Amino acid sequence: MDESVITIYVEESGERIDALLARSLEETSRSAAQKLLLAERVWKNGKTLKKNYVCQAGDVLEIHLPPAKEIALVPQDIPLEIIYEDNDLIVVNKPRGMVVHPAAGHEDGTLVNALLYHCGDSLSGIGGEKRPGIVHRIDKDTSGLIISAKNDFTHVGLSQQLSDHSLFRIYEGIVRGHMREPSGTVNAPIGRSTKDRKKMAVNYKNGKEAVTHWTVIEEFAGYSHLRCQLETGRTHQIRVHMAYLGHPLLGDATYGAQSPDKGFSGQCLHARELEFTHPRTGELIHLTTGLPEYFASILRALGTPL
C-alpha cells in the first residue's frame, strides 16, 4: 500500500508543529506526531521540519503518512448474546469491554471477529473492509444492543433510518448529581474538542447537530439514573451532552472524574432498546434487553432511591 500525502495550510502563527499535527490529523497523538517529524515525514518548501518548529501563518505543510498497517480479520469463536436474527440482520447484546471493530491495539477479540465466525461471509460490505456489517457502533465500555446488516440492501435501509432519525435507540445511564427537571432535551452540536483533539465536545462553530432527550428514572444520594433517547448519533453523544449539563456519567474518566467513581471505571451506560423498520419486510421491530449485572450492582450500591 502506497503512502498518502496530506497538505495542511496554517492560518495562525505560534503553535508548535507537533501540537498542530496532533490537532489536525485524525487519530494522531502528539507523540505519534513527533514520530512523524523524527522520521522526516513532515515537509515545508521541500525541507523537513523538527518537532520544536513554531508554525507561521501561511505555512503550507506536507505530511507523508506511512502505509497503514494491515489488520487481518480473523473469525473467532466468541460467544454472542443474540437478541434477534434473520437472513438480513442480526442484533447482539454487546458486553461491556468488547470493542466493536478491529483497530490498532485491538486487532482481535472484537464484535466483528465474533460476527465473522457466526455469520460467515453473509455480512454487508458497505461498512468497509474493517467494519463488515456494522451499521452503527457503541463504545467499548458501553454495553447493549447493536445491529449489524448481512447484506447491502439491509445496510442501506438501516443507514437511511439512522439518517432520518426513525431508528430509535434508547440508553440507560447513571450520572453524577441531580437534574433540575424530571426530563429535558439537549440540542447542542458536537465536534472535535479544540482543547484536546482526542475528545469530542459541544462545538457551536464546527460541530454537527446532536440531540439527546433524557428522563429521570430514579434519584439517589448524589446520583441519578436516566433514560436517554438519541435523535442523532454523534461520537460519544450521551457522554458529551451529560458532561455539558454538568452531570457526567458515573465512571467516565474522559468527560468526568479522573479517578474511579464509586470504584467503577468506564462509563455506566447501557443501550437498552432498539426500534426500527425492517428494510425488507416493513415490519416494525422493537427490541429490549435487561440491565447487565455491572449496572444492576451499581444501582444496589447506591442504596435506596430518594
Image: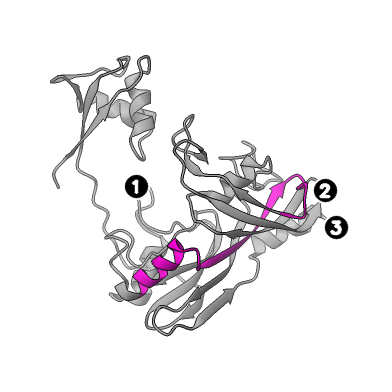
In three-dimensional space, the C-alpha distance between marks 1 and 2, rounded to whole angstroms, equals: 40 Å
**Residue under numbered circle 3:** 304
Which of pointers 1 and 2 indicates the residue nearer the eye? 2
As helix, strand or loop, the secondary structure at mark 3 comes to loop
Looking at the image, residue 75 lies above or below residue 250:
below
Q: Quadrant of residue 35?
A: top left
In three-dimensional space, the C-alpha distance between marks 2 and 3, rounded to whole angstroms, equals: 9 Å
Q: Nearer the viewer, residue 39 or 77?
A: 39
- Numbered marks: total: 3
Q: Nearer the viewer, residue 223 or 251?
A: 223
- Give coordinates of residue 230: x percent, y percent: 56, 59
- Give coordinates of residue 139: x percent, y percent: 50, 54
**Residue under numbered circle 1:** 104
Label 3: how many Cα within 10 Å (few below 14, some 14–19, many 20+): few
In three-dimensional space, the C-alpha distance between marks 1 and 3, rounded to whole angstroms, equals: 43 Å
Looking at the image, residue 191 lies above or below residue 139:
above
Q: Amino acid at mark 2?
A: Ala
- Give coordinates of residue 34: x percent, y percent: 31, 25
Q: Find the magenta span and give its range.
A: 154-183
Q: Amino acid at mark 1?
A: Ala
**Picture residue at 52% right of the left edge, 80% below the top:** 284
As helix, strand or loop, the secondary structure at mark 1 comes to loop
Q: Amino acid at mark 3?
A: Thr
**Picture disc at residue 221:** 2
Which of pointers 1 and 3 indicates the residue nearer the eye? 3
